[in-house]
Image: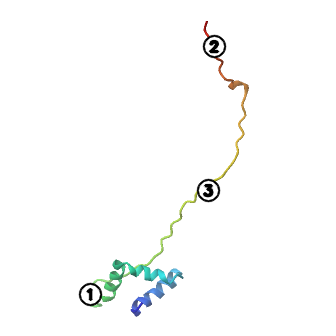
Amino acid sequence: MEDARLEWIRDRVYNGLDLKDPKLFENFLDDDKNDDVMRKFFSQSSAEETAYAILFYIERIDREREITVDYEVEVEVTDDEEEPENEESG
């Protein structure tokens, strides 16, 4: 990274969000849209009436885990559940 301003922001983001992977911010800037937003943010003049801010956050997604459980079921058969008898007409 050659821009000291980007390095400064990266260091603050990593510290604030407790990030360790050094490639995260570089991967973020690899997206041209994100890089353009950052550079536009730096190029804003302090004479403008509009204030700008960039917000960095982490979104954590808990994914449901599929767990397979094997179990046996014992079924009790009673005399009330007898099979029907075939009746022959004659």
Quarter containing the C terminus? top right
Q: Which residue is mark 1?
A: 48
Kindly state the secondary structure of the residue where label 3 is placed: loop
Of the image marks 2 and 3, the number of the one nearer the N terminus: 3
Q: Which residue is mark 2?
A: 87
Q: Amino acid at mark 1?
A: Glu
Of marks 2 and 3, the one in the foreground? 2
User: Where 39 falls versus 60 (above or below)?
Assistant: below
Q: Amino acid at mark 3?
A: Ile
Pointer 1 local density, CA inside 10 Å: few below 14, some 14–19, many at least 20 = few
- For the point 69% across and 48% down, the residue is 71
Of marks 2 and 1, the one in the foreground? 2
Q: Which residue is mark 3?
A: 67
Q: Amino acid at mark 2?
A: Glu
Mark 2 touching mark 1, by CB under 8 A? no
Q: How many marks?
A: 3
- For the point 28% across and 90% down, the residue is 45
Gap in Å between the C-alphas at discs 3 and 1? 57 Å
